[in-house]
Amino acid sequence: MNCKKAERWIPLAAGNDLSAKKAAAVRGHLERCPDCRKDVAELEQALRAAKTLAGAERAGDWSEAEWRSLLRIVTAGGIKKKRVWAGLPLKPVLAGGLGLVFLAFGSFLLLKKSPAPPFTQASFKSPSLEQVQTKGLNDLPKITSKTIVSKETGFKIIWFYNKNFQGDGFGK
Amino acid sequence: MNDRENTLVERVLNGDLAAFEPLVTPYRKPLLGLAYRITRNSEDAKEVAQETFLRAFKYLKSFDLEKDFKSWLYQILVRAARNYRHKQSKYEGLAMSEPAKELAVATSQDPERRHDGAEIRSRLSDCLDTLTPREKEVFLLRDIEEMNIRESARVLGCSAVSVRVHLSAARRKIRARIKERYPELMEGGR
């Protein structure tokens, strides 16, 4: 071990915080290196000094009355016991139950709502040419339509779509 | 794991609130001491320690009886101190209120002793001021409270490697400060 490597471990060696293997390696280096030995000795002295200062410092304490009062405040709320239902914690059981109720209600609503009627030619009546001619497209009930006009002949094809987007058309 | 403490924890959880006092009383001074060393202010220390006891009681049912009650309390205290520091810096624009009059020396009527106490306090504060908050926590837990690396890591919620890294840096900084300003302490004085 050289000084550069030992330098990393020396602060930990000063407080006996190295594994046995590393500590042995550092000890081996210290036997050969007076500079690193001095480094460790200084760190040990500094640690001892800091501990002495901390030990001499009296952080104080609560008075007995203050301590009693503090304990009263701390324990005032009492211990809230976990409420159980059939051996299970109550809150998750309640949450799960409510979830199931909402799921059942949602499914019921979905099933109750009738599905869209199947498309048949009879169920869809596109406006007739007369209706278009007499009322105009704007006055007809709102139906999606697509108009294709031939530039050459002026022939017009109008496609009307039902809500299933199935179309019926006529030309004029 | 401590059987006496576990019994007391179970008694408190079963509604015997009086058992909380013998459970926490042994830690009353050590917790207040650590809170003081972190905050460097007696009033802040009292607030942090009080918050620690409040949280310990509130979350006692989440305490794992397989674990060490002391480490658990220290863990709460370190977090309470961090929150307190965060609040202080938010409202006052300071990391912590300035080192103030401490509890103990104020109780001493002997002026010489009071002076000694103030000097010790200011020296230690001066040394600790060179450290970052994390280095300070690591240094206090390992070198002053004499917890081992693993315990310190558990209390701080970090890895043992992280503790070692911060501890190395902290020890070097403390050494540099003592050597620079209080060389007489390095020669085995005081």
Image (cartoon, rainbow, N blue to C red):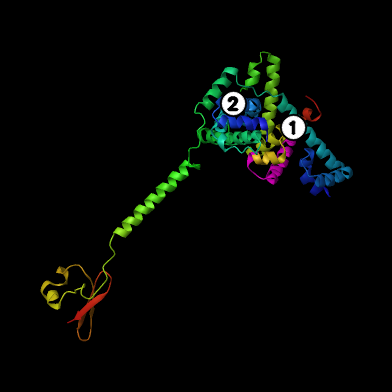
Look at 57% across and 38% down and name the residue there. B62
Q: Quadrant of residue B119?
A: top right
Quarter of the figure that contains the C terminus of chain A: bottom left
Mark 1 is on which residue type?
A: Ile
Q: Which one is nearer the viewer's eye here, A70 or A76?
A: A76
Q: Residue at x 76, y 41 (%)?
A: A17
Q: Which residue is mark 2?
A: B19
Front of the two marks 2 and 1:
2
- Give the total number of marks visible in the rendering: 2
The residue closer to the viewer here, A112 or B55, is: A112
Q: Which residue is located at x 20 percent, y 83 percent?
A: A155
Residue placed furthest toward the bottom: A152
- Counting residues from the N terminus, which is met first, the one under dot 2 or under dot 1? 2
The residue closer to the viewer here, B15 or A27, is B15
A155 relative position to A26: left or right: left
How far apart, in angstroms, are the residues tagged by discs 2 and 1?
44 Å
Residue B90 position within the rendered picture, expressed as x and y whole percent measured from the top left: 52, 36
Q: Is residue A110 left or right of residue B110?
A: left
Secondary structure category for the residue under label 2:
helix
The secondary structure making up most of the magenta span is helix
Is residue B9 visible in the rendered image? The answer is: yes
Q: Magenta residues?
A: B155-180
The answer as to whether the residues below labels 2 and 1 share one chain is yes
Q: Amino acid at mark 2?
A: Ala
At horizontal 21% and vertical 69% (from top left) the residue drawn is A143
Q: Label 1: few (<14), some or many (≥20) within 10 Å?
A: many
Coordinates of residue B102 in the picture (x, y in percent): 63, 22
Mark number displayed over residue B178: 1
Q: Is residue B148 above or below residue B161?
A: above
Residue A14 image position (x, y, % from top left): 79, 38
